[in-house]
Every structure is written in C-alpha cells, then in structure tokens.
Amino acid sequence: MLPSDKSLMLAVRDGEVDQFGELFRRHHHRLFAFFYRMTASPAVSEDLVQEVFVRMLKYRRTFRADSDFSGWMYQIARNVRADHYRMGLPETGLIDQARPDHQADPADEITKREKLSVLQRALLALPHEK
C-alpha cells in the first residue's frame, strides 16, 4: 500500500527530504493544470509549479499533523499565484492577446490594453478562494 500524501509530507517535515520526489510526482500535473487555467502559458505555469515545490520544501516545518495536505499545498499555490501577479503582468494568454496587431488601429490597441489592465486588477482583487 502506498503512503498517503499526508504521511509523506510529515516524513519530509521531519527530515526525510528524499520522500519529497514522490509528492512532486503525484501533484505536479495537477498544479500545472491549476496554473495553466489562469495563465494560458505553459512556461509561466511550469515556473509557478516549481515555485510551489520550492516553497513546500522551504516551509515544510509549517505542515502540521492535523493539516490536510491538499489544502496546504493549494494555499501555497494561491500565494505563489498572488505573488507572481503582484510583481507585474506576466506573459499570459490575456497579455498575449493584448499584443499589438500590425494591422490594428493604435487607438484600439490602447483601449484594449486598458480594458485588459482593468480586468486583471479586478481578478487580482478577488479573494483567493474565488
């Protein structure tokens, strides 16, 4: 029988860092999908997944025996996402769509970028759980 995510994380927390690879194997695809839905960018999504696992290792001692592993991991993921967007607008699907089209009217492009900026700020203002 395979160990649970919780038991693996407890082992990692207590110094058995070699167990961390199994958690990565189990969850990196789901985290990638989580970020890809928001960014529409494989490169950005992969970077964010890596940052989640870096932070999981860094903050492993904060994982408690009464914690839900998935909830703890996704809270870190939400924090990574928020930190990433706070640093500026990434190259995502929204931004890629806002790139100037050589045949488009420059005034239309400015309006489009302004609307996307307002939309991005509104999305960032939403609570993490939304």
Image (tube, rainbow, N blue to C red):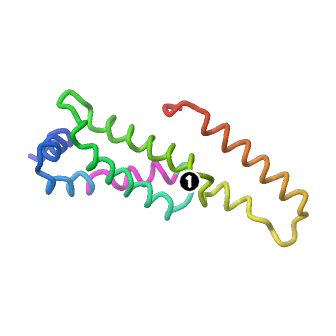
Residue 70 rendering spot, x and y as whole percentages = 31, 38
* Nearest to the observer: residue 56 or residue 40: 56
Left or right of 45: which side holds 3? left
Q: Which residue is labeled 1 in the image?
A: 39
* Nearest to the observer: residue 23 or residue 48: 48
- Locate residue 76: give its quadrant: top left
Left or right of 14: which side holds 92? right
Magenta-span inclusion, residue 12 = no
In the image, residue 57 sits, relative to residue 130, either above or below, namely: below
Total residue callouts: 1
Image quadrant where one finds the C terminus: top right
Work out which residue is located at the far bottom of the displayed protein and give it: 102
In the image, residue 76 sits, relative to residue 29, either above or below, namely: above
Residue at the spot x=51%, y=43% of the render? 82
Left or right of 29: which side holds 96? right
- Locate residue 93: give its quadrant: bottom right
Name the element at disc 1: helix
Three-letter residue code for mark 1: Thr
* Nearest to the observer: residue 40 or residue 110: 110
Magenta residue span = 25-36
Left or right of 68: which side holds 30? right
